[in-house]
Image (spheres, helix red, strand yellow):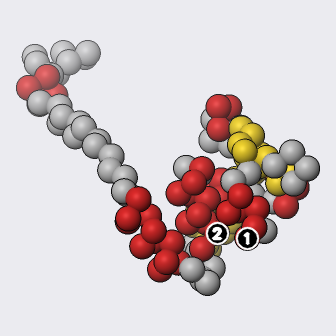
Amino acid sequence: MKIDLIQTNPADKVERPKKNRFIGSFYDSDEVEKLFAAAKGTNLEIPIFLGAFYGLRRSEALGLKWSAIDFQNDTITIRHIVTSCNLDGKHVQIAQDTTKTKSSLRTLPLVPPLRKSC
């Protein structure tokens, strides 16, 4: 069109696809109890617990360090993440000293069940 080879832009007649609206779901208390029971004693027990109680993203749960837990003040601070990706055909994990957003940097109260499992 810009150099007058065609009179109309064929892309003007294309309808853009509509975005599907996301509707999230969540577990009720019975489902959470079943999940805890299924994960008990496995490597996933603590990450599942962190996700259920604190709503942590997977990368935030993987990025937790012992220094993030303050037993004196009963707090847990989220400030690191670990993500994984394929880079040049290899599966690698990338640790970062930052979170997805600034509001993701947060300090939360340490719940008694987590304190006991630490």
Measuring from the top left, give residue 23's x and y in whole percent. Answer: 28, 43
Type of amino acid under label 1: Ser
Q: For the residue carrying disc 2, how many other residues have a C-alpha within 10 Å: few (<14), some (14-19), or many (20+)?
A: some
Judged left or right of residue 48, residue 92 is right
Type of amino acid under label 2: Ile
* SS at circle 1: helix
| C-alpha separation, residue under disc 2 versus residue under disc 1 | 8 Å
At 65% from the left and 31% from the top, the residue drawn is 103
Rendered view: 80 above or below 42: above
Q: Which mark is residue 46?
A: 2
Measuring from the top left, give residue 15's x and y in whole percent. Answer: 11, 30
Which residue is at the front of the view, 34 or 59? 34
Measuring from the top left, give residue 73's x and y in whole percent. Answer: 86, 45
Q: Quadrant of residue 91?
A: bottom right
Rendered view: 82 above or below 90: above
Which residue is at the front of the view, 95 or 117? 117
Marks 2 and 1: CB-CB under 8 Å? yes
* SS at circle 2: helix
At 61% from the left and 59% from the top, the residue drawn is 50
Judged left or right of residue 82, residue 66 is right
Q: Which mark is residue 28?
A: none
Q: Which residue is mark 1?
A: 117
Judged left or right of residue 62, residue 26 is left
The N terminus lies in which quarter of the figure? top left
Q: For the residue carrying disc 1, how many other residues have a C-alpha within 10 Å: few (<14), some (14-19), or many (20+)?
A: few
At 61% from the left and 84% from the top, the residue drawn is 41
Front tag of 2 and 1: 1
Q: Quadrant of residue 63?
A: bottom right
In the displayed orientation, state which residue is furthest to the right.
72
The C terminus lies in which quarter of the figure? bottom right
Rendered view: 86 above or below 104: below
Q: Is residue 51 visible?
A: yes
